[in-house]
Amino acid sequence: MTGLSSAPLSTERLQALWRELNARYFRGALPPIEIICSRRLTASAGMFVSRVGPRTRAEDRADTTDGRRDIRLSLPLLQRPSEDIGQADREILDTLAHEMIHQWQFDVLKRRPNHGPDFARKMAAMNRDGLGITICHRFDEAVRAFTKHAWRCLRCGKVYERQRRTIRPSRHRCGACRGTLREVPPSEVARRTPRVHSQRHPTGSPFTAQLELNFSIS
């Protein structure tokens, strides 16, 4: 048996899930946003992208047809073969919810998306209702399988792994400490275990259970 890799993710189903999460956890405050299933995104399971400032007028931001704001979900990472279809669906649910918190920071709080206190509080509140959102998406080994290039910060040691050579040490600095980056062979990158800041509630809530039921593959 295979998981979601047997069929492309449906944007209609993802939008329906987004609307349910928006109503339940954000009181419908999030403006519409395009959800893109990306074959090129392999550095993370999901990403919130914006090409406008957080204080842009809401009526301008609500127009999603110009591609200035979107949530991207990784097809390679979220449609891997799996014997547990339910687990695959929960990974999609949790990844989408993670990126929706970033959208909430941007659209509602008018702040640059981050994993600071606002994110942690919203994540904890949603996880108490049965979700399994984490700060770090749980795909380190899968991401590493796509890694062809890597850079290490000479100051703090943080490693950046990419499928393409998108980092230029002459232009880019470490996001954690602003240190200098040096390219290293991916084979030299030590195996790292992601810190999981929260766990799925053992039983969940009726609402979350219904979401997972509605989202599962028939």
Image: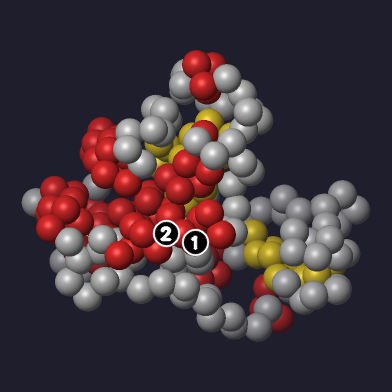
Q: Secondary structure at mark 1?
A: helix
Residue 172 location in percent, x, y?
Answer: 83, 53
Position in image of residue 67 (x %, y %): 53, 25
- Can see residue 163? yes
Report x, y in % for residue 212: 18, 55
On residue 123, the disc is: 2
Label 2: how many Cα within 10 Å (few below 14, some 14–19, many 20+): many
Q: CA distance from mark 1 to mark 2?
A: 5 Å
Q: Residue at x 57, y 27 (%)?
A: 68
Which residue is found at the position 77% from the left and 76% from the top?
157
Q: Nearer the viewer, residue 61 or 81?
A: 61
| Residue at 87 percent of width and 49 percent of height | 171
Give amino acid for label 2. Answer: Met
Q: Please tell me the numbered disc located at residue 120.
A: 1
What amino acid type should be assigned to the residue bearing mark 1? Answer: Ala
> Which residue is more in the foreground, 49 or 148?
49
Q: Is residue 59 left or right of residue 96?
A: right
Labels 1 & 2 near each other (Cβ < 8 A): yes
The quadrant in which residue 176 appears is bottom right
Asked which quadrant contains residue 52, the reply is: top right
Query: Can residue 11 be seen at all in this image of the molecule?
Result: no
Question: Is 52 located above or below residue 128 in the figure?
Answer: above
